[in-house]
Amino acid sequence: MVRGNSLINDLRLLINNPRYSDLEIICKDNYVLYGNRAILAARSEVFERVLFTRSEDLDKQVSFLKIEASSMKIILEYLYTGTVLERDITTNNAFETLNAADFFQLENLQDLIYKKMCEKEGNENKSPELLSKA
């Protein structure tokens, strides 16, 4: 892949990449993901509060023990690129990811998940089913 041709593709190289990260994110299943605190804080008010308002002590780790790693990866992808790949959202992780998007106050991601799930199901009537689980 040639760098510099697509901002989204270049930013995807940063997702969960320890080489470019200054933060470890511990998930529910004790899986460690890697992030860049500047990008995360700039894109999410929740990350801003968690990472920078406690004190000047900048921890190298942050824990979100109620969020599965698979859902956190989708959150990271969205925060880095503004979108998610359709293949990443499945019926197995949609509900968990919706809850995580709600926690991080990412309304546009929630809308994107609803839309992608409706497209996968080929039926707009699935949206109330997802809403009832939320």
Image (cartoon, helix red, strand yellow):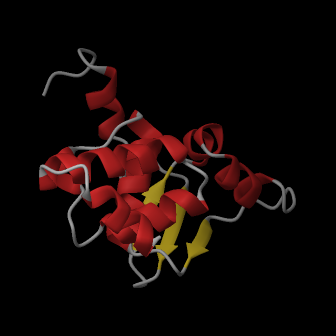
Identity of the residue drawn at 23% across and 50% down: 118
For the residue pair 33 and 132, the one nearer the viewer reads as 132
Q: In the visual, does 37 lie left or right of 48?
A: left
Q: Quadrant location of residue 125?
A: bottom left
Identity of the residue drawn at 50% across and 74% down: 26
Count of numbered tags = 0
Q: Vertical placement of 31 versus 8: above or below?
A: below
Identity of the residue drawn at 46% across and 82% down: 28
Q: Vertical placement of 98 versus 38: above or below?
A: below
Q: In the visual, does 25 lie left or right of 72?
A: right
For the residue pair 6 and 85, the one nearer the viewer reads as 85
Q: Quadrant location of residue 95?
A: bottom left
Q: Vertical placement of 126 versus 21: above or below?
A: below
Q: Quadrant location of residue 91?
A: bottom left
Identity of the residue drawn at 26% across and 59% down: 126
Residue reaching furthest to the right: 55
Quadrant holding the N terminus? top left
Residue reaching furthest to the front: 125
Q: Vertical placement of 74 versus 8: above or below?
A: below
Residue reaching furthest to the bottom: 29
Q: In the visual, does 71 lie left or right of 23?
A: left
Q: In the visual, does 120 lie left or right of 107?
A: left
**In the rendered image, is residue 105 in sight?**
yes
Whole-percent x, y for residue 80 in the image: 43, 39
**In the rendered image, is residue 20 in sight?**
no
Whole-percent x, y for residue 59 in the image: 69, 65
Whole-percent x, y for residue 45 in the image: 69, 47
Residue reaching furthest to the top: 5
